[in-house]
């Protein structure tokens, strides 16, 4: 179908965008790459009065270094994140997870910030962002504030952002030299994850010194697999130690049930994929 | 126009139609714009079964740009009942099938109102203003429950959800013994129940139609496979004389049987254009398409296979339930019946019985989908052959070899009463086995089992045949099908030397323009480039039975040959006259006539001009060489082949990865081997999709929960292995080209090959079936339930 009629605004600065959003009220909607929003509009599942398109806000695009962090603009496309040398060097996990998002067409249109703000628990960027302790910088009429990853994701498709706030950038601490892998499990190449596991490891000598593990689609929000992390730290990465650590993968999760997997199956996947993600990271 | 050394038939030519199809710079129905054209949008029922208690269209009529809003009540007197051309039994129950629901909706997605507006957006907007109340009725979804005593009824006035029961019994037909005797006398009896899940054809171009009532004829452009049948049936449904209707199928983007239909949307658009006196266009959304265009498959198959301990087959009993959905569409009831002759497949046995009960449910109607009845049958028998082999501890290929019809036994009349004209199962199988590396894979399989590897390997076999080239009209008549199965071709020899071929087949992506040009070029000795293929317009293609059932080449291609022969017969008379010799003294080599034993000759091009200007024709010869012909086949054609699949099953996640896929198909003579290969690739992909990915799922209220392509998983190239395809060529003996048809073979063959491979990988773990689609969760759950280590 054709979406219901709406007013269209395409500001060129973030400040303008924030102001327009505030003026337009709660029935307005911010559009980034449109890869999730447009189907919703076309199926008339939503009918915003105003669509505020951020694609002309140049300040929201690109990746830069800021001391010990990378700053990724919310409107940076998946394609640009994938290929960015800073991301690949300092946050390889994000680059790897971005590689698995949908298909090339979507990655050229879809944006890093749009995907995170959409907060679909089956989206592939949430768990890496959580595992890497990213910080979300959101702008509103009162200025900017920073939200930690573990507070940003609130529920299915729900973030800590108020209706009148816009995600403008994501700060990623540098994980230079860490080993990483994103293990995605889905049914066809361009589909969402049934379960995904994001793993980043710092290895010191023969032992794992630090571990960050995040789970995709094991609850209404991304989940940090703390039990796995604790079990890995200090261990040599052997098949046995990895398997034993991966047994903790489903702790604290509350997986949903749908045609692709019931809770029992998703629990199994979380364990198996965690072992594989850690193993793959170690051999990367 | 000189003869070329290399024949066109057999050349892997690039397709001449592809440039325009791939770039989209062509006439797709939705691209077309007519002066004053209006747009239609349809309101569809969210309920699967309900009485319509109120429809208020007042507000919608007041919306900007709205020209008209109509309900089923408004159309009730004009819309008639959609046609079902295949009443399979005398006592078949057929519900009234209005294009737009009048008092009751019977599946979710059924049209209940239409808005016609100046723009598509305005039509969509106005839909939301239609106020409609439903009174819910109990929803009938499960076939077995639907035919139990006291079941809720889809159509109260029919008094039952049983549509019809159709039986083939080899003892009664005289084609074999009695099944009960065969089972009683057998040493081994294997019984299984399989589910053929419901599929959605998911053609690329959504259904689209534009009806122009300007002038004396009403012209309907439609993205259809069947312009000729659509014209006939539109006349029958609406009462408008057929002579006042012109149907055009312009370029059409895929069908897979899904556009072998006379749709409610076409009838509604036609009636609205006629009523308003303005062109009206309707193009469905993808979600509308998935919910309301007809679905395919959906059977429960109870199979009983009886054999001796040495593997010799004794008999097969097939008991089917086939889901018709809420209404009977064009050939719905006959689809499972096409499988009746295919369950016995390539095997010899003493007795065979097939009993199919068609059932109504509150779901989207089912109808033809690539293979139509034959994939279901092939799946059933090929799965059963593997189950029997396991029961007997025999190699599954050995069991097949032991029972198949050998090359020297053709022509062979089967236990289901068909006569297979030709086949060479040995050659196709030997070639496939060698390419596949069967023995090495078996050794690896054993090795993985021995070390209890997380990745287990399975080998799946499908030695299929199918019946296609639909169809001998006499057979169709005997099966109570309302139409014939012939095909028509006309050749126009233009005075400039160019040739127009008018075909009654209706391509929607197959490459007919290329293949038909190759045939004409060889027959007449004209350059490939000089042949123009015209199709799909009932005003130029005056007779035809359209494209479905892998019929276009075997039936329509043969009609081309016959028409070309008539052109040449007439040309020979004219040439003899021009060369002043007796007709018997004329030789024809492609492109040129000559006098036997001399160097005197005339080019066909000169004969064409001579016949066209008609200044000096022999007595009794009419002007022009134009000729036409109709071909009605004596028999079906029977492609066959051997498909082998190696699948890796990840026992920890249940994921199936196809490691290799080898097939050797025998489709007779290949007119264009590249097109054949393309059909096989696409066919396998669609069959693999049934095995692993696709399923139309309804929730308990009858709502389709796989209503978008994010939920209905059509695989892409990234999800499939590289297919190793090759051919043997055993010519069909029933047509002059020796061709059989290839449109459905890959789909028919591949589904059981994949599932057999999955089960083979896990049989030692106590698994003997995984329900389709074999999702990772289903495979993993089957391993858990199998329990064996």
Image (cartoon, coloured by chain):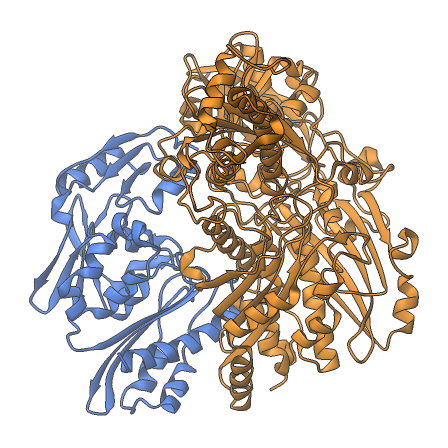
Chain colours: A blue, B orange
| Vertical side of B517 occupied by B79: above or below | above
* Residue at the extreme left: A67
The image position of residue B540, as x and y in percent, is: 54, 21
The image position of residue B708, as x and y in percent, is: 48, 46
| Vertical side of B82 occupied by A240: above or below | below
* Residue at the extreme front: B598
The image position of residue B588, as x and y in percent, is: 53, 34
Residue B61 visible in image: no
**Which residue is drawn at the image coordinates 42% and 57% (left, top)?**
B717
Quadrant in which the N terminus of chain A appears: top left
* Quarter-of-image position of residue B543: top right
The foreground one among A129 and B68 is B68
**Which residue is drawn at the image coordinates 17% and 73% (left, top)?**
A175
| Vertical side of A179 occupied by B486: above or below | above
* Quarter-of-image position of residue B542: top right
Residue B425 visible in image: yes
Q: Is B66 left or right of A5, judged from the image as shown? A: right
* Quarter-of-image position of residue B470: top right
Q: Is B179 left or right of A43, judged from the image as shown? A: right
| Vertical side of A238 occupied by B463: above or below | above
* Residue at the extreme top: B215
The image position of residue B683, as x and y in percent, is: 54, 53
**Which residue is drawn at the image coordinates 56% and 17% (left, top)?**
B272
């Amino acid at each position: 179908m054709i979406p219901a009629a709406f007013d269209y605004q395409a500001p060129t600065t973030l400040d303008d965008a924030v102001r327009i959003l505030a003026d337009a009220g709660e029935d307005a909607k911010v559009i980034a790459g449109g890869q999730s929003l447009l189907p919703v509009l076309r199926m008339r599942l939503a009918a915003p009065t105003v669509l505020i398109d951020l694609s002309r806000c140049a300040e929201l695009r690109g990746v830069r270094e800021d001391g010990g962090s990378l700053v990724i603009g919310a409107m940076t496309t998946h394609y640009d994140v994938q290929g960015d040398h800073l991301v690949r060097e300092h946050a390889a996990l994000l680059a790897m997870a971005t590689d698995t998002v949908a298909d090339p067409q979507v990655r050229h249109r879809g944006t890093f910030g749009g995907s995170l703000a959409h907060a679909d628990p089956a989206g592939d960027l949430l768990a890496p962002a959580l595992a890497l302790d990213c910080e979300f910088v959101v702008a509103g009429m009162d200025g900017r504030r920073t939200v930690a990853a573990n507070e940003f994701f609130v529920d299915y498709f729900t973030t800590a952002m108020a209706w009148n706030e816009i995600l403008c950038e994501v700060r990623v601490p540098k994980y230079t030299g860490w080993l990483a892998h994103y293990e995605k499990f889905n049914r066809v190449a361009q589909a969402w994850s049934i379960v995904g596991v994001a793993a980043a490891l710092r290895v010191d000598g023969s032992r794992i010194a630090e571990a960050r593990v995040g789970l995709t689609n094991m609850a209404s929000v991304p989940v940090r697999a703390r039990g796995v992390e604790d079990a890995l730290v200090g261990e040599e990465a052997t098949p046995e130690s990895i398997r034993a650590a991966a047994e903790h993968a489903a702790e604290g999760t509350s997986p949903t049930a749908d045609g692709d997997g019931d809770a029992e199956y998703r629990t199994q996947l979380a364990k198996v994929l965690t072992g594989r993600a850690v193993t793959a990271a170690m051999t990367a | 126009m000189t003869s070329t050394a290399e024949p066109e038939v057999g050349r892997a030519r690039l397709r001449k139609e592809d440039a325009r199809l791939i770039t989209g710079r062509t006439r797709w129905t939705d691209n077309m714009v007519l002066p004053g054209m209006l747009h239609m949008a349809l309101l569809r029922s969210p309920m699967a079964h309900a009485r319509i208690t109120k429809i208020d269209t007042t507000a919608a009529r007041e919306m900007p740009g709205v020209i008209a809003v109509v309900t089923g009540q408004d159309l009730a007197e004009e819309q008639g009942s959609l046609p079902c051309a295949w009443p399979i039994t005398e006592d078949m129950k057929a519900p009234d099938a209005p294009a737009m629901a009048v008092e009751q909706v019977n599946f979710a997605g059924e049209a209940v109102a239409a808005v016609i507006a100046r723009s598509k957006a305005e039509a969509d907007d106005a839909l939301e203003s239609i106020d409609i109340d439903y009174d819910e009725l109990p929803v009938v979804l499960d076939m077995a429950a639907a035919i139990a005593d006291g079941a809720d009824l889809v159509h109260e006035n029919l008094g039952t959800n049983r549509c019809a029961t159709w039986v083939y019994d080899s003892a009664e037909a005289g084609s074999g013994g009695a099944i009960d005797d065969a089972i009683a006398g057998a040493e081994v009896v294997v019984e299984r129940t399989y589910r053929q899940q419901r599929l959605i054809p998911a053609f690329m171009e959504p259904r689209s139609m534009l009806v122009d009532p300007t002038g004396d004829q009403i012209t309907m452009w439609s993205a259809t496979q069947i312009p000729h049948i659509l014209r006939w049936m539109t006349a029958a449904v609406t009462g408008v004389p057929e002579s006042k209707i012109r149907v055009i199928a312009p370029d059409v983007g895929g069908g897979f049987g899904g556009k072998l239909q006379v749709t409610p949307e076409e009838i509604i658009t036609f009636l609205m254009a006629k009523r308003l006196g303005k062109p009206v266009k309707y193009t469905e959304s993808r979600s509308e398409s998935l919910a309301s265009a007809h679905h395919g498959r959906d059977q429960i198959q109870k199979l009983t296979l009886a054999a001796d301990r040495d593997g010799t087959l004794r008999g097969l009993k097939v008991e089917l339930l086939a889901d018709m959905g809420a209404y009977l569409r064009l050939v719905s009831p006959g689809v499972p019946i096409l499988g009746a002759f295919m369950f016995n497949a390539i095997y010899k046995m003493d007795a065979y019985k097939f009993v199919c009960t068609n059932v109504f449910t509150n779901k989207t109607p089912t109808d033809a989908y690539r293979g139509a009845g034959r994939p279901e049958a092939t799946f059933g028998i090929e799965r059963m052959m593997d189950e029997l082999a396991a029961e007997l501890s025999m190699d599954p290929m050995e069991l097949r070899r032991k029972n198949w019809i050998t090359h020297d036994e053709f022509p062979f009349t089967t236990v289901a009463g068909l006569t297979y004209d030709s086949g060479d199962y040995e050659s196709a199988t030997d070639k496939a086995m060698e390419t596949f590396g069967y023995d090495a894979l078996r050794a690896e399989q054993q090795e993985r089992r021995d070390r209890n590897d997380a990745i287990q390997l399975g080998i799946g076999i499908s030695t299929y045949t199918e019946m296609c080239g639909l169809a001998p009209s006499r057979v169709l008549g005997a099966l109570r099908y309302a139409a014939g199965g012939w095909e028509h071709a006309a050749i126009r020899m233009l005075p400039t030397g160019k040739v127009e071929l008018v075909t009654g087949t209706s391509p929607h992506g197959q490459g007919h323009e290329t293949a038909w040009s190759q045939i004409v070029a060889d027959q007449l000795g004209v350059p490939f480039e000089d042949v123009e293929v015209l199709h799909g317009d009932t005003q130029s293609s005056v007779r035809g039975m359209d494209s479905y059932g892998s019929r276009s080449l075997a039936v329509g291609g043969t009609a081309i040959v016959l028409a070309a022969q008539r052109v040449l017969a007439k040309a020979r008379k004219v040439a003899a006259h021009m060369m002043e010799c007796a007709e018997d003294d004329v030789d024809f080599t492609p492109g040129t006539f000559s006098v036997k034993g001399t160097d005197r000759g005339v080019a066909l091009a000169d004969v064409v001009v001579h016949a066209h200007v008609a200044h000096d024709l022999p007595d009794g010869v009419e002007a022009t060489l134009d000729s036409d012909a109709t071909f009605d086949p004596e028999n079906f054609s029977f492609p066959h082949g051997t498909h082998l699949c190696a699948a890796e099953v990840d026992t920890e996640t249940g994921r199936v990865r196809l490691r290799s896929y080898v097939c050797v198909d025998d489709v007779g003579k290949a007119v264009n081997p590249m097109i054949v290969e393309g059909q096989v690739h696409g066919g396998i992909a669609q069959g693999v999709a049934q095995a692993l990915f696709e399923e139309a799922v309804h929730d308990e209220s009858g709502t389709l929960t796989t209503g978008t392509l994010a939920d209905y998983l059509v695989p892409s190239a990234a999800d499939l292995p590289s297919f190793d395809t090759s051919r043997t060529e055993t010519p069909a003996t029933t047509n002059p080209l020796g061709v059989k048809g290839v449109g459905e073979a890959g789909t028919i063959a591949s589904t059981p090959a994949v599932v057999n491979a999955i089960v083979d990988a896990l049989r030692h773990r106590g698994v003997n079936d995984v329900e389709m689609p074999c999702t990772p969760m289903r495979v993993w759950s089957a391993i858990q339930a199998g329990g064996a280590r």
